[in-house]
Image (cartoon, grey):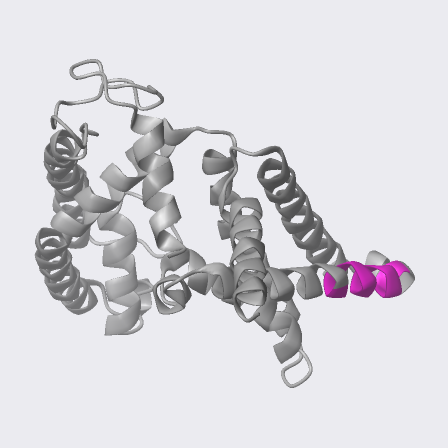
Amino acid sequence: MKEIPERNHDLLRKKIYIIIFRSDTPAGRLFDLSLLFLILLSIFSVALESVATFRRDYLTYIHIIEWTCTIFFTIEYALRIYVINRPKQYIFSFYGLVDLVAFLPTYLSFFLAGTQFLVVVRAFRLLRVFRILKLSRFLSEGNILKQALQNSMHKIVVFLATVLTLVIIMGTIMYLIEGPHNGFENIPISIYWAIVTITTVGYGDVSPQSPLGQFFASILMIMGYGIIAVPTGIVSVEMAKATELAKKRCPACRAAIVDSEANFCSNCGVDLKQIQTNAEAQKLQ
């Protein structure tokens, strides 16, 4: 007698899993599109709440929309944890944390005024549009960019440390050359000027007046053009490496799959969709 409720329980979890995590079914696609609509609606309502006229005339309606979306996202988050075999893996994943933060600020607004505006982080959930619309090519390119940034992180950190040292030295030199009477009132302001100059932004609110100061400023400007190109080259090299490593391969013969949307391997003919379906079914076991 106990097997029937357990079997019904497993069937229910499987149905919910397909609706929430699978966008290749009518119910799953409808759920995801409804989710995207509510995300856009909630972000739009929060933006309107920051406008004084809308806040004065339509605050009640804005709160109704916000709480409706929040309750929906809370239930959805709980269901995602319910149907996954390893909930911790989802909870501490990127999307799991984004899903949590998506509804948390509304509840925090009871204790900290103004935190409801932080729900704009729900915009991160719009990244699911690539999965919903089957734009897997964009997802793979996003993973390549992520891998490239991770691989180049140490080099970029060293580069940024070098630039930081340079602007501190140049800012201090400019403070000694120009002084407070030319706008360089202290070393922090001088360092700010060096950062603005080396990044070629050039606000112009602080500028050297003496010939020696202008000479040093010219050197820093020229160095800025070369410095900007360095991290670009670092990331470009890592992206080329990540692109080669990220090529999708057939689970059976390990041949590279050119078309990410292909149903069968062009080399051995294995059914790729069936393998994917079997892998997802194992998550529920």
Position of residue 51 relative to residue 231, above or below, is: below
Number of dots carrying numbers: 0
The span shown in magenta is 58-67
62 left or right, relative to 179? right
Q: Of residues 102 and 214, which is closer to you in this image?
A: 102
- Residue 98, given in percent of the width and then of the height, sits at 47, 60
- Magenta region, main secondary structure: helix
Query: Is residue 87 among the parts visible in the rendering?
Result: yes
* Residue extending furthest toward the right: 57
- Residue 127, given in percent of the width and then of the height, sits at 47, 43
For the point 75% across and 54% down, the residue is 48
Position of residue 95 relative to residue 100, above or below, is: above
- Residue 174, given in percent of the width and then of the height, sits at 18, 62
For the point 46% across and 37% down, the residue is 131
Quadrant for the N terminus in the image: bottom right
For the point 76% across and 61% down, the residue is 68
- Please tell me whether residue 25 belongs to the stretch shown in magenta: no
- Residue 196, given in percent of the width and then of the height, sits at 30, 52
Q: Of residues 241 and 198, which is closer to you in this image?
A: 241
42 left or right, relative to 135? right
* Residue extending furthest toward the top: 266
Q: Of residues 67 and 92, which is closer to you in this image?
A: 92
* Residue extending furthest toward the bottom: 111
* Residue extending furthest toward the front: 1
Query: Is residue 118 among the parts visible in the rendering?
Result: no
Quadrant for the C terminus in the image: bottom left
For the point 34% across and 50% down, the residue is 282
Q: Quadrant of residue 225?
A: top left
40 left or right, relative to 123? right
